[in-house]
Amino acid sequence: MDKLGQLNQQLVNDIEKAATLQEVEDLRISALGKKGTLTLLMKDLGQMSPDERRVMGAELNALKDVLSAALDQRKAQLANEVLASRLASETLDVSLPPRPSPSGKVHPLSHVLDQAIHIFGQMGFALAEGPDIEEDFYNFTALNIPPEHPARQEQDTFYLPVASDGQPLVLRTHTSPVQIRTMQNTPPPLRIIAPGRTYRSDDLDATHAPMFHQIEGLVIDKQTHMGHLKGCLEEFCRLFFEDPELKLRFRPGYFPFTEPSAEVDILWNNTTWLEILGCGMVHPNVLQNCGIDPAIYQGFAFGMGLERITMLKYGIEDLRLIYESDLRWLNHYGFAPEARE
Ligand code: DAH
């Protein structure tokens, strides 16, 4: 074997023995790199006679092809081995439990609203909505609260600039205007609840806030009476507070839009009566204001504070905490998202 042949054999042996991709690469550089053995031999071709060059050139090119093929082959072999060993070692155990991922909590107010919608929904109540910015007419006048009525002052209204069509506007002081909007738009019988934000010019303290939430209820039908009102609210309170024995007390009260009116207390821990809502039979004037004949239809209505029942049910002592968005508080008082009904 000539010198070139020996060199060739030596390089091919080395390549076949290379144990890593790096070793293959090093061998490629040492033979075919800028200063590689074969590259230098090719450079010498320039000093040879044309005849010598033809013979040597052909031989060197053939050698280069052999080496390139050997390098490629070994490279592919090693890459396959690397892949095979990774596939063997990096198995995925699909039976392992997932890592716990931090999840957000549902605010107690949203949770209570979900519960109320669910309970009333089962009793056949549909959801109704109205605007936060309300016309004076819907917030007061149509609810049998004339302009000079003291109830307007009692409610500490936020007044807004008069609308372009001359309508006086307010931030609604209660959800009761949704009663009017619903009665005007939908013929009876009716059975709705209307949850939403309400506003009063109060200071923020442990029991008051300038913005809070109410849930309004309205039932209009041909034979509705106080017994239905009591039964409905009793059912709701017992389901909501998860106490089938919960005692309710209906105290005579006054609201311009209901007659008779009552305030409802629940007996808390069998010791204290706590007021939780206002209610009554819809005043005939209110029905008339909405184009409903009070000789044919009667109904009942109620309104309760969402914050109030949330604080009672979950033992939240200070109203301000509900609005503070303190994540530590939310983690403690909030509910897992899957608990949403
Ligand atoms: N709107 C009353 C309030 O904000 C609550 C209320 C009382 C609503 C009696 C009613 C009702 O629908 O019948 O204080």
Image (cartoon, rainbow, N blue to C red):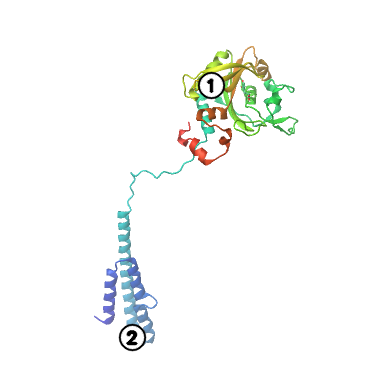
Q: Are the two marked residues, 2 and 1, in contact with CB atoms closer than 8 angstroms? A: no
Instruction: Give the number of the mark in front: 2 or 1.
Output: 1
Residue 230 lies in what quarter of the image? top right
Amino acid residing under circle 2:
Glu
Residue 282's mark?
Answer: none
Report whether 282 appears left or right of 115.
Answer: right
Q: Please state, as top left, top right, bottom left or bottom right, where the N terminus lies in the image.
A: bottom left
Evaluate whether residue 39 shows in this view. yes
What percent of the width, then of the height, locates residue 153? 71, 26
* The residue positioned farthest toward the left in the image shown: 1
Mark 2: which secondary structure?
Answer: helix
* The residue positioned farthest toward the front in the image shown: 271
Return the residue at label 2. 52
The one nearer the camera, 318 or 262, is 318
* Marker count (numbered): 2
Residue at image point 35% right, 70% down: 25
**Is the residue marked by circle 2 packed among few (<14), some (14-19), or many (20+) residues within 10 Å?**
few
What separation in Å lies between label 2 and label 1 (alpha carbons)?
A: 117 Å
Return the residue at label 1. 272
- Going from N to C along the chain, the mark reached first, 2 or 1, is 2
**Is 66 above or below relative to 115?**
below
**Is the residue marked by circle 1 packed among few (<14), some (14-19), or many (20+) residues within 10 Å?**
few
Residue at image point 52% right, 38% down: 329
